Image (tube, helix red, strand yellow):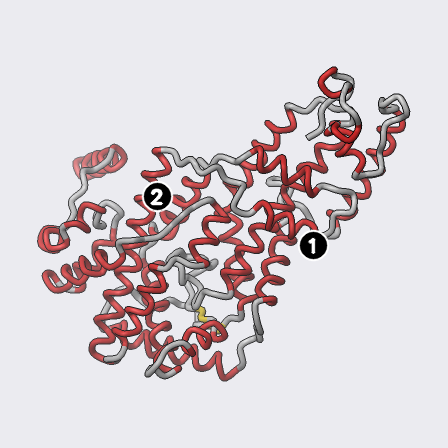
């Protein structure tokens, strides 16, 4: 980044080795014969460059005043990447009907298996572009802690700078850094949209409200790789999974917010690699920066923005998040597996395929790593499925599903080590201070009554 050419460390260096001279040369700003910058000319040129840059950035869409991010630009890149990965037609009327019929049959079967009610929003068929649109607000929320960390890192970076015209360069540097991160987020979401089979395929609730949404184009690609399984069975199996998952999210009010809060908590403690950020800005900031330039810069920055160090607190949050996600997906495995045992005998083979797909990580894991630095892989999903099955066999489906009534009642990672013990006795957590105070108030109310 730029430093003051009047300082001995900089002024004694030839122009080709002077970082400030190299940086300003990108904008056609060069020192005079004596190697010094005329401050009046420099100020005028920087003002002109800044006006040009602001015009270019405005062409990408409005910038969010709170975060400095251009979310319209982010979404546009996500949609462009999704379109580049293969045909993405809007689902036909027939495909929409097939999805609604599959979800309707899934609801009929699940009515006999779980007590959680049906979701009120009709099931829909989505294209990849529709998945980007339908989940984007949630991704924006999850990425906000990283945006805050990025802004703080930029502030620290620019506070070291003491070059002439620094006040003019700050908005450009901020806009360029935000644009590169926006491009990185957009690329990750666009790639993920080509892999997911349903709205919450990765285990997180991503929609504005509970709703079953399936992606026929991606499901066709997934089903084409399977042998001895009809396309109708694949669609019904995936509809069962997503319907069960959405009914769980809709009925358990604390679950979705808890999952999101854990992701955001982890992201808040991410450390930005300022050297990688500085290098990317120096390499890519120019007066002629276009959307394609920012996208390429985002690709360069991907995988380098976050420092690899993980704090003890992040380790604890990651363990809690992986356990909770394993419990969600394990519950879905158990519910769907038990349902299919009665109605769809070949469904168990599909369950194993989904488990192998999940264990491989793939784009979902890569997307979360690029978005919030989170290397997430719920390794204990099979253990969780066995635990839920043991509870059902021991105490029935009502006891299995009642464990979701309060976060203190759900199994812990220790319970996953002893599923039979949990099945017989459940998990009784020690009440925290808030629970104790609440109980005290309730006792006082009863006494007054």
Query: Alpha-carbon distance for marks 2 and 1?
Result: 35 Å
Q: Quadrant of residue 319?
A: top left
Q: Is residue 384 visible?
A: yes
Specify few, some or many for label 1: CA neighbours under 10 Å numbering under 14, 14-19, or 20 or more: few
Quadrant (top left, top right, bottom left, bottom right) of the C terminus: top left
Query: Residue 138: x, y in percent?
Result: 49, 53
Image position of 196 with respect to 256: above or below: below
Query: Residue 240: x, y in percent?
Result: 33, 72
Residue at left offset 27%, top offset 70% = 336
Residue at left offset 40%, top offset 68% = 120
Q: Which residue is mark 2?
A: 318
Looking at this view, is 120 or 49 the one in front?
Answer: 49
Q: Quadrant of residue 229?
A: bottom left
* 308 on left or right of 172: left
Query: Residue 373: x, y in percent?
Result: 46, 44
Image position of 257 with respect to 232: above or below: above
Q: Which residue is mark 1?
A: 292
């Amino acid at each position: 980044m730029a430093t003051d050419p009047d300082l001995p460390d900089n002024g004694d260096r030839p122009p080709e080795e002077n970082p400030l001279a190299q940086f300003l040369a990108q904008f056609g700003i060069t020192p005079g014969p004596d190697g010094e910058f005329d401050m009046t000319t420099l100020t005028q040129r920087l003002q002109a460059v800044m006006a040009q840059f602001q015009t270019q950035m405005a062409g990408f869409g409005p910038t969010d005043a709170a975060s400095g991010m251009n979310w319209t630009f982010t979404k546009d890149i996500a949609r462009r990447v999704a379109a580049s990965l293969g045909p993405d037609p809007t689902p036909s009327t027939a495909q929409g009907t097939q999805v609604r019929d599959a979800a309707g049959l899934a609801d009929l079967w699940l009515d006999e298996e779980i007590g959680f009610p049906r979701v009120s929003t009709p099931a829909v068929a989505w294209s990849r572009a529709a998945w980007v649109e339908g989940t984007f607000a949630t991704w924006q929320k999850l990425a906000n802690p990283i945006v805050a960390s990025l802004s703080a890192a930029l502030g620290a970076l620019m506070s070291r700078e003491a070059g002439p015209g620094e006040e003019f360069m700050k908005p450009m540097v901020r806009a360029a850094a935000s644009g590169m991160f926006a491009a990185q987020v957009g690329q990750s979401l666009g790639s993920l949209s080509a892999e997911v089979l349903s709205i919450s395929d990765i285990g997180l609730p991503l929609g504005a409200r509970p709703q079953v949404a399936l992606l026929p184009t991606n499901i066709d690609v997934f089903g084409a790789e399977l042998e001895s399984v009809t396309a109708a069975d694949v669609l019904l199996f995936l509809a069962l999974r997503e319907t069960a998952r959405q009914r769980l999210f809709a009925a358990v009010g604390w679950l979705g917010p808890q999952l999101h809060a854990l992701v955001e908590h982890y992201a808040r403690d991410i450390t930005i690699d300022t050297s990688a950020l500085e290098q990317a800005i120096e390499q890519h900031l120019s007066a002629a920066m276009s959307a394609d330039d920012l996208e390429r810069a985002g690709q360069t920055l991907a995988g380098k923005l976050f420092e690899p160090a993980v704090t003890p607190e992040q380790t604890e949050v990651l363990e809690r998040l992986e356990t909770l996600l394993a419990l969600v997906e394990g519950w879905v495995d158990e519910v769907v597996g038990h349902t299919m045992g009665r109605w769809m005998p070949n469904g168990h083979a599909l369950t194993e395929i989904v488990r192998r797909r999940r264990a491989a990580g793939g784009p979902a894991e890569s997307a979360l790593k690029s978005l919030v630095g989170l290397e997430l892989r719920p390794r204990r999903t099979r253990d969780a499925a066995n635990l839920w099955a043991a509870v059902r066999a021991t105490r029935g489906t009502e006891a299995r599903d009642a464990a979701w009534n309060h976060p203190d009642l759900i199994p812990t990672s220790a319970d996953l080590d002893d599923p039979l013990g949990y099945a017989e006795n459940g998990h009784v957590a020690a009440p925290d201070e808030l629970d104790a105070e609440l109980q005290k108030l309730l006792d006082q109310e009863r006494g007054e009554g």
